[in-house]
Amino acid sequence: MNSLNDYCELIVDCEHKTAPIQEVGYPSIRTPNIGHGFFILDGVNRVSEATYTEWTKRAVPLSGDLILAREAPVGNVAVIPEEQQFCLGQRTVLLRPYKSKVVPDYLCYLLLTPLIRGQLISKSGGATVHHLNMKDIRALHIGTLPSLSEQAQTASVIKAYDNLIETNRRRIALLEESARLLYREWFVKLRFPGYELAKWQDGLPERWRFGQLDQALFLQRGFDLPHGARKPGDIPIIASTGVNGFHNEAKANGPGVVTGRSGTLGVVHYVHEDFWPLNTALWVKEFRSVTPFVAYFMLSDLNLAQYNSGASVPSLDRKVVHSIEVLIPPEKIMALFDEQIGPFFEQIRALQEMNKCAQYARDELLPKLMSGTIRV
């Protein structure tokens, strides 16, 4: 009986303490940053070189290594890509496969199959939070693997879907950055159409005004929805890190804007359709004097992570956020802005739908390829 330990030269636990973070530096990979075969680096914590050195004393993560989530959710895993320097955040484990025995991508996809994930979940304890211990991770039953060439062929089929999804993610990021630059040109630098002819008073163009954030929009805490209560559907569940799953019921109408309340702070999500905002998030319940597009970029520009009020778990107090002073533009300028960037977000939505279809096809294909039901 072959275990995970038989296929890995290193299985290393993370440091069991919170790393000090800063705005720039090395990415610290925590469980919210690990998806199903890919890393989610939006809003990732970053650490200094000194912290990176301290947190990699047990092992320096290398390209081709895997990072496995021990908690929340148990069993998510991804392969470190080339030219990336990561360190382990809390509740993660580093796996370094014997490349003479197993292709790293193949091992990653194998760990994501329902059979292996079922083992991981069954071995995880805890009344409220599932948690894997190192002994069970090392003893995970893997079985006999096909030849390296067969592993590489199988992994390459699934990897093609992942590459498509990643390419679309990059395209989405470029579109969002283009829209963000336009927002800053108009609403931060105040170089909006016709600014040369605008009348200015007290340092502001006519009909522009400063006000508290709650005069522009109103944030509301999201709603609990345990995994056991979720029902099959296509309504996205939005957590502080983004889409956390799907349900058959919505709590908020789209378009919407969501940001983190607990755990991950500072990342803002624009949601095209009706959605369920999770309790780790704050969502815009009322757009009082700004449009959804302007609200999205306004919140993104505030760098909300700096308002963290949590001691051990990062958290955001909406009363504090509501009191932040913001610049509120006139309706005419916002309407022009929405008209300009609307096509950008139409493309973003199309790419997101493409990724959703690719993800579904990949997840359907994965267990069949890995079990040999379909051969390449």
Image (cartoon, rainbow, N blue to C red):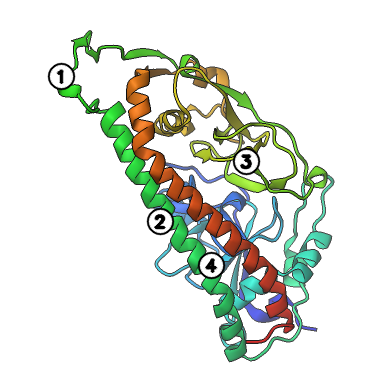
Q: The N terminus lies in which quarter of the figure?
A: bottom right
Which mark's residue is nearer the viewer, 1 or 4? 1
Say what secondary structure mark 1 lies in: helix
**Cα distance between the residues tagged 2 and 3:** 23 Å
- Look at mark 1 in the image and give the residue it sits on: 197
- Look at mark 2 in the image and give the residue it sits on: 171
Give the crowd class for mark 4: few <14, some 14-19, many >=20 residues within 10 Å.
some
Query: Which amino acid type corresponds to the residue marked 3 in the rendered image?
Result: Ala
Q: Which residue is drawn at 54% across and 40% down?
A: 272
Cβ atoms under marks 1 and 4 closer than 8 Å: no
Give the crowd class for mark 1: few <14, some 14-19, many >=20 residues within 10 Å.
few
Q: Which of 29 and 110 is in front in this view?
A: 110
Query: Residue 297, percent across and down?
Result: 41, 33
The disc at residue 239 is: 3
Query: Which amino acid type corresponds to the residue marked 1 in the rendered image?
Result: Leu
Which mark's residue is nearer the viewer, 2 or 3? 2
Say what secondary structure mark 3 lies in: strand
Task: Please say whether residue 328 is visible from this viewpoint.
Answer: no
The disc at residue 162 is: 4
